[in-house]
Image (cartoon, rainbow, N blue to C red):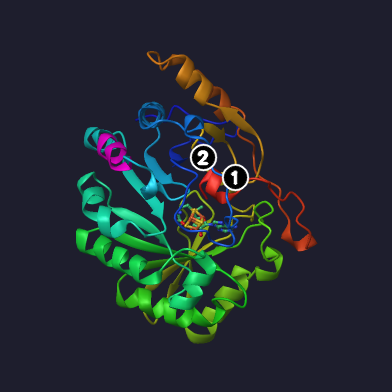
Amino acid sequence: MTPRLIDPFHRAITYLRVSVTDRCDFRCVYCMSENMTFLPKKELLTLEELDRLCSTFVNLGVEKLRITGGEPLVRRGIMTFFQSMSRHLESGALKELTLTTNGSQLERFADDLYAAGVRRVNVSLDTLDEDRFAAVTRWGRLPQVLRGIDAAQRAGLRVKINAVALKGFNEDELPSITRWCAERDIDLTWIEVMPMGDLGNEDRLDQYWSLKDVRARYAEEYTVTDLAERSGGPARYVRLEETGQKIGFITPLSHNFCESCNRVRVTCTGEIYMCLGQEDVADLRAPLRDHPEDDGPLRDAIEAAILRKPKGHDFDYSRQVADGQMTRHMSHTGG
Ligand code: SAM
Ligand code: SF4
């Protein structure tokens, strides 16, 4: 299909990330405060609205759909949504349907996800130590997540672990997490922590562990080869020659991927963010709700938003102040 969503910088938008809830059964310290106030239900897109929204994007040339949150698998009825989206996989319009999850509900849903056509899942996991896991997620329990990962693999889902690199927290686990992933044939990506709003937690600039340092740590133990492969997103990859593992590094704040950016994000309330690092936002919920029988206004709103996609974002950690620190949380935009 010829991509229909082309932004002013000639980038084809083929990748959509959609947050289906702002709620979560964890309270990760870098993502949420302990006492979160969640949105009233009427603010959220219904499952039917989510279906119309995603289907309209698919009709406009989106080929990859990633479902996120909050925790997507705690949204009631979400499996109906996945099952419904599978029609776009069957038609060939959608190439990939996937999700990012904390893994807590995977034991329950892995088989259903596979049946709906999901083949890969990203599971966020920062530590393999039970006490540390409880500390960083506040409400999470490691064994439940590990059972979820096992269930996902048994169901035939390819698992990728996303680990947030936190100084003084999981630095010493780099070798053990890497080995654990290798033993299970699980891909691993490290994410640099982002300054997201004021969570009233520890200062995240103190927790900041640069992925340059992470890479250097690998180089102490392995022969590290940079890979040219890019995904249109902020991930870069290296191969550890001794194990053959491919390790990803996501530096969400770096500019170096903006020119190939192929994605937009939609929040659980139907706001479209054209760039993770900028505040510009457009509302898709009104055209959805005001025209329940007609997707035309929604299509127009999406096309108009894409024409506002900026060239790149401006974020600078080197100043060591949270310049441009965003007031919205990852649980809002869906990471
Ligand atoms: N609940 C799901 C999960 O944890 O995978 C999906 C939503 S979560 C917001 C998506 C990703 O954002 C997770 O991998 C999480 O680690 C990451 N994340 C959240 N807050 C972050 C921050 N301040 N900096 C970097 N990554 C963050
Ligand atoms: Fe929940 Fe994911 Fe945020 Fe952790 S990172 S609080 S699991 S939404």
The residue under the point 75% across, 56% down is 322
Q: Splitting the image into 4 quarters, where does residue 310 fall? A: top right
Quarter of the image with the N terminus in it: top left
Viewer-proximal residue among 30 and 86: 30
Image coordinates of residue 166 in percent, x first then y, are 59, 71
Horizontally, residue 195 falls left or right of residue 230, namely right
Task: Tell me where residue 268 appears, x and y as whole percent.
Answer: 49, 37
**Where does residue 183 sit, x and y in percent of width and height?**
31, 78
Q: Please state the extent of the stretch shown in magenta in the rendering.
A: 78-84
Q: Amino acid at mark 2?
A: Arg
1 and 2 marks in contact (CB < 8 Å): yes
| Frontmost residue, 153 versus 42 | 42
- Callout 2 environment at 10 Å: few (<14), some (14 to 19), or many (20+)? many
Residue placed under numbered mark 1 in the picture? 276
Q: Is residue 94 magenta?
A: no
Mark 2, residue position: 265
Mark 1 belongs to which amino acid?
Answer: Leu
